[in-house]
Amino acid sequence: MGVIENDLNEDTFIGLELPLTHTQNGFFNRTKTALEQARSNIKNLLLTNKGERLGNPTFGTNLLSLVFSQENTDLEARVEEEIRAAMSEFLPFINIVSIETNFSNENMSTAIVNLRFTLNVDVTSEENLTLDFSNYNIG
């Protein structure tokens, strides 16, 4: 069964949604479409620090340390470069439509990254993921 057929089948689940939580239907939220699962996979990749995943030390990004670094010259371009490099290596089946990074004028450590994407198998369906780095503590 193909990706689109799975998405249309009400009885088929694609994967698990992160973070893992307890719900009315059990211990894990499940994703029903390939786009929902891709969204969860992107979030997992971008919020995992390089070196954090056992057995795969290159998995992840340095986004958290980049966003909270004292060096803020050309930060938007560096954030986009970090995201594109990780996505092309670990999630090559996802097309990035746009990456928009907004920093607070009062506090450069408050960043919101908005990512729009599609899947290679269906470029007409687009999904959005927003990462708010203002709630993260490094240390």
Image (cartoon, helix red, strand yellow):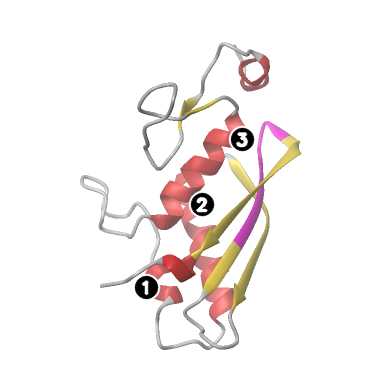
Number of labels in the image equals 3
| Boundaries of the magenta span | 114-122
Mark 1 packing: few (<14 Cα in 10 Å), some, or many (20+)? few
Residue 135, quarter of the rendered image: bottom left
Badge 3 is on which residue? 35
Badge 1 is on which residue? 65
Along the polypeptide, which appears first: circle 1 or circle 3? Answer: 3
Which residue does the image show at 61% across and 17% down from the upper left? 6
- Give SS at disc 1: helix
Q: Is residue 120 magenta?
A: yes
Which percent across, then down, holds residue 85?
50, 59
CA gap between label 1 and label 3 equals 28 Å
Mark 3 packing: few (<14 Cα in 10 Å), some, or many (20+)? many
- Give SS at disc 2: helix
Badge 2 is on which residue? 87
Q: Amino acid at mark 2?
A: Met
On screen, residue 83 versus residue 19, left or right, reads: right
On screen, residue 75 versus residue 29, left or right, reads: right
Which residue does the image show at 34% across and 70% down from the upper left? 137
